[in-house]
Structures are given as C-alpha cells and as structure tokens.
Amino acid sequence: MALRFYPDARTLVDVVCVCDPAVAAANTSEALQRYRASGDLSEIVVPDDASRFTIRPLNGQAPGRATAEAGVLGKPVHDVLDRIRTGEADVDRLTPEDEALFERFMVWRGRRAYNLCRYGIERVSDFPGVTAAAVGGLRCYPTEHLDRVPDEARQEIADHLDRIGSAAPEGKACSGGRSGAPPGTPVP
C-alpha cells in the first residue's frame, strides 16, 4: 500500500457530509460508514442537491492555530477521555464530575472543528461566489457563512481535514480532486 501525501494548501478536495439529508437518503448505512472512514466519494451516491464542500489540507501554522484557539483541555479532561478510550469508563454512566469534564471536551471539540473549517474550507456549493480569503496571513472561510453550516457538518468536515492533512493509504484518501482530476491534483 502506497501513501498519498497532500503536499500543500493548493490541493483542493471535494467532500460531502453524511448528515446531509440528500446524501443520507441516497445511500445505505454501510456505504455511508465506508465513506466516513475513507472520504472516498466513489463509495457513495452523491445526489445533485447535496451540499458540496471544497476543502484544502491545512499546513503551516493553521492546524496548530485551530487547536490552540479552541483552548486548553487540561489533565482531568484527558484522564476521563483515557478511561473512556480504554473501556474503564462508559460515556453513558459517568459520574457528574466526569460528565462535566466530558462535556468540556465536547465543547472544545466543536470549537476545534469550527476553527479547522474556518481555515480549511475553500468554498461551499450552497454559497455561490463565496470563497476563502487571506486574513492575518492565513486563508479563512468567511465566518458569516461558516456560522450557517450545522455543527454536525462542521465536525464531519473537520474529520475530512484531519484525514487529508496526514498520510492516507492509496485509494483511501478523499477523492474529490477538482474537475475530475485525480485526488491530490494541485490547483494552479
């Protein structure tokens, strides 16, 4: 298996969200699960009325900035997450203290997803003519439009951004290169 690296922020990738009712209605739950895991649009049927997001890999200072702007979680939150991850704690049966810490994590996760989307979305099909622009040395999608994207969709897009910002197995990376070009094709 070869690795595919998305080299820089000029590489654009189209994605859709499984939480989009048009996408959900057109696909089986198995196909949607495969797409969530791979980001490969060939795994699903993409209806014409689906919202399409054009994203670019985050590089340079953008990923760290997005995470830093979300805030610091602290050791108690990480301890609860570790207990959940290892099976020592059940997310549905947390103590009130642990539940508050887990809620803090979920709020942080939402802020991080918002920030990743702000830096990683280039355009959204539902907002024609609106594109990211340079702000403070980084390309940013306009917040007045990003605020209109549902939280669940922002989290899915953040997951796609995390995936394309790192190495992915050949054929498993997001496959929405521009104008029918192969995935990972740089945009001039």
Image (tube, helix red, strand yellow):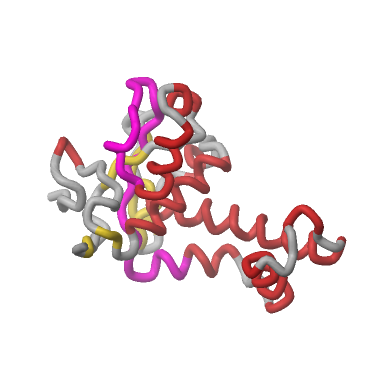
Q: Is residue 159 above or below residue 131?
A: below
Inspect this view and state whether residue 7 appears: no
Q: Position of residue 187 (x, y in %)?
A: 16, 49
Q: 3 and 107: which one is in front?
A: 3
Residue at the image position 69 percent from the left and 70 percent from the top:
83
Q: Is residue 156 above or below residue 43?
A: below
Q: Position of residue 87 (x, y in %)?
A: 68, 66
Q: Position of residue 114 (x, y in %)?
A: 52, 51
Residue at the image position 21 percent from the left and 44 percent from the top:
177
Residue at the image position 33 percent from the left and 64 percent from the top:
166
First to last magenta residue range? 39-65
Dominant secondary-structure state across the stretch colored magenta = loop
Q: 177 left or right of 125?
A: left
Inspect this view and state whether residue 106 appears: yes
When asked about the image quadrant of residue 147, the answer is top right
Q: 80 left or right of 116?
A: right
Residue at the image position 55 percent from the left and 65 percent from the top:
69
Q: 22 left or right of 164?
A: right
